[in-house]
Amino acid sequence: MENTIPQPEKVLYTAKTRTTGGREGSAQSSDDRLNIKLTSPGAAGPGTNPEQLFAAGWSACFIGAMGIAAGKLGIRLPADTAVDTEVDLYQTGSEYYLQARLNVSLPGIDKETVNTITTMAHQTCPYSKMTRGNVNVTITAV
């Protein structure tokens, strides 16, 4: 099978983290901007989980991709643009999977234009590219 992923021309940024202890451990970035306790989903006590981190990262990236898409259409994103992302960890048989819902709010922009922007963003957002064909994704204008 041939690799269809383009080789990098220029690496723009490399995130470096060290995680210990798995879902009940901690994660820290090399620059110490991220230094968090991890907990399993639904567990009591402090900490976040990988699904929450993934949802937050995807939301932020998707808003950036929508900004690029909107710019191509000659539109400026509203200051109160928001993406509420839900990432489900689920099980089928003995296998674990993720699925996601991105609920997009672009106040003051008509639904048809929002759908155009989100479709364009879903084609260019690196998180969307990474999950394409691997994660069930629903994008909804709210």
Image: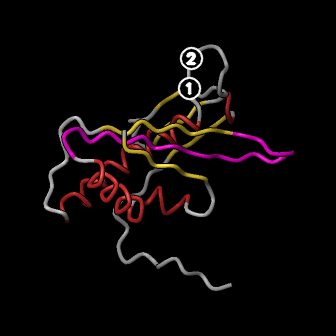
Residue that lies at the very extreme toward the bottom in this rendered image: 2
Instruction: Tell me the residue at 22%/57% (across/down).
Output: 70
Q: Taken as a whole, is the magenta stretch helix, strand or loop?
A: strand
Q: In this rendering, which labeled residue sits more in front, label 2 or label 1?
A: 2
Residue that lies at the very extreme toward the top in this rendered image: 45
Specify the quadrant of the image occupied by residue 106. top left
Q: Secondary structure at mark 1?
A: strand
Q: Bounds of the magenta span?
A: 90-109
Label 1 neighbourhood size at 10 Å, few (<14), some (14-19), many (20+)?
Answer: some
Left or right of 108 in this view: 3: right
Left or right of 138 in this view: 31: left
Q: Give amino acid for label 1.
A: Lys
Q: Secondary structure at mark 2?
A: loop
3D distance between C-alphas at marks 2 and 1: 7 Å
Instruction: Tell me the residue at 34%/54% (across/down).
Output: 115
On residue 37, which mark appears?
A: 1
Q: Are marks 2 and 1 in contact (CB under 8 Å)?
A: yes
Q: Give amino acid for label 2.
A: Pro
Please count the marks in the image: 2
Q: Nearer the viewer, residue 85 or 10?
A: 85
| Dot placed on the residue nearer the N-terminal end, 2 or 1 | 1
The quadrant in which the C terminus is found is top left
Q: Nearer the viewer, residue 64 or 115?
A: 115
Q: Which residue is mark 2?
A: 46
Label 2 neighbourhood size at 10 Å, few (<14), some (14-19), many (20+)?
Answer: few
The quadrant in which the N terminus is found is bottom right
